[in-house]
Amino acid sequence: MPRPAVRFLLALAVSAAGLRGAAPPPPAPAWTGEERLAAGEHRAFLIAAPRPPDRGPRPWVWYAPTLPNLPGGHENWLFTRLLAAGVSLAGVDVGESYGNTAGRAGFDRLHALLTARGYSPRPALLGRSRGGLMLLSWAAENPARAAAFAGIYPVTNLASYPGLERAAQAFGLTPAGLAAELPRHNPVDRLAALATARVPLLALHGDQDRLVPLADNSALLHARYAALGGPMELLVVPGQGHSLWPGFFEDPRVLDFLLRHALHAPTPVR
């Protein structure tokens, strides 16, 4: 049976405080035009917009992390509206890579695969939680290929999450070795090229997030990017943590940002 493009994510083991006012997401719809792809050895998906623009490369939003249970039903609101506007969606499963070299190579394969099929060389990037590590790590090496980045409580700092002890295994290093190599791998330490290219960033983050603390992730990203002259908007949600609160997934400002940059990304000069 084909994999549903958007899976229903069961909200298990989430605190009542984090889910204050939340309702279960709707079941994932049976998207038309969804494909299962192989990007090298990696499993990928593509949900083609039913009515893409008549001219030029097809716009798309690149979602991460793509895992067996993500994207999930909470993304339905965003995905439905992006598709209706002519923006396709795609992602590739590089496992719990935390933005490591192998994961970035897997992202290169997806980019090559889709651009060969007529999709824009400059997708807009959408990172949920640890998807921020994956997409920002790739974008730091490919600033001319990133139209913009939007994050929903994104992880931007390996030292904060998952922590160097745990992340080191994914990088094939000791924790001390990874600490020494953070300038090569850590998004908040690799922003100069993105700022020079003036790639727009946006982050939506709760001020009560204990798993991915605001101060050590989105706020640190904002401070460092602004110091480099890069454009970024930080949207802080009072009283919310790392939760499935619908407001994280149904914010019109995130939708407008993605539409604006996916639909109007200039083609890079070769």
Image: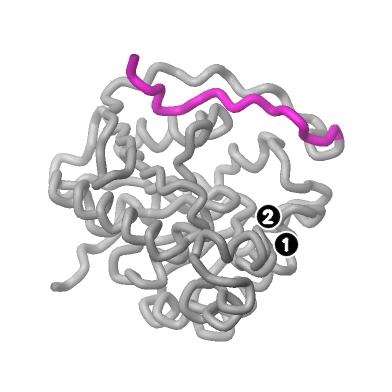
Residue 169's place in the image compared with 44, above or below, is below
Mark 1 and mark 2 residues within 8 Å of each other at the beta carbon: yes
Q: How is the image coloured?
A: one colour
Residue lying farthest to the top in this orientation? 1
Q: Which of marks 1 and 2 is nearer the N terminus?
A: 2
Front one among 180 and 88 = 180
Residue 158's place in the image compared with 96, above or below, is below
SS at badge 2: strand
Q: Residue at (28%, 58%) from the top-left corner?
A: 108
Q: Looking at the picture, which amino acid does disc 2 mark?
A: His
* Separation (CA) of disc 1 from disc 2: 6 Å
Q: Name the residue under label 2.
A: 205
Front one among 257 and 17 = 17
Left/right placement of residue 206 relative to residue 249 reads: right
Q: Residue at (51%, 81%) from the top-left corner?
A: 183
Q: Name the residue under label 1.
A: 214
Residue 206's place in the image compared with 89, above or below, is below
Quarter of the C terminus within the rendering: bottom left
Provide the residue span drawn in magenta. Answer: 1-16
Front one among 209 and 201 = 209
Quarter of the N terminus within the rendering: top left
Percent coordinates x, y for residue 197 in the rendering: 36, 77
Q: Residues within 10 Å of mark 1 (few under 14, many from 20)?
A: many
Percent coordinates x, y for residue 63 in the rendering: 43, 45
Q: Does the magenta stretch include residue 3?
A: yes
Percent coordinates x, y for residue 99 in the rendering: 47, 61
Snapshot quadrant of residue 11? top right
Percent coordinates x, y for residue 163 in the rendering: 67, 64
SS at badge 1: loop
Q: Is residue 125 magenta?
A: no
Q: Residue at (58%, 19%) from the top-left corner?
A: 26
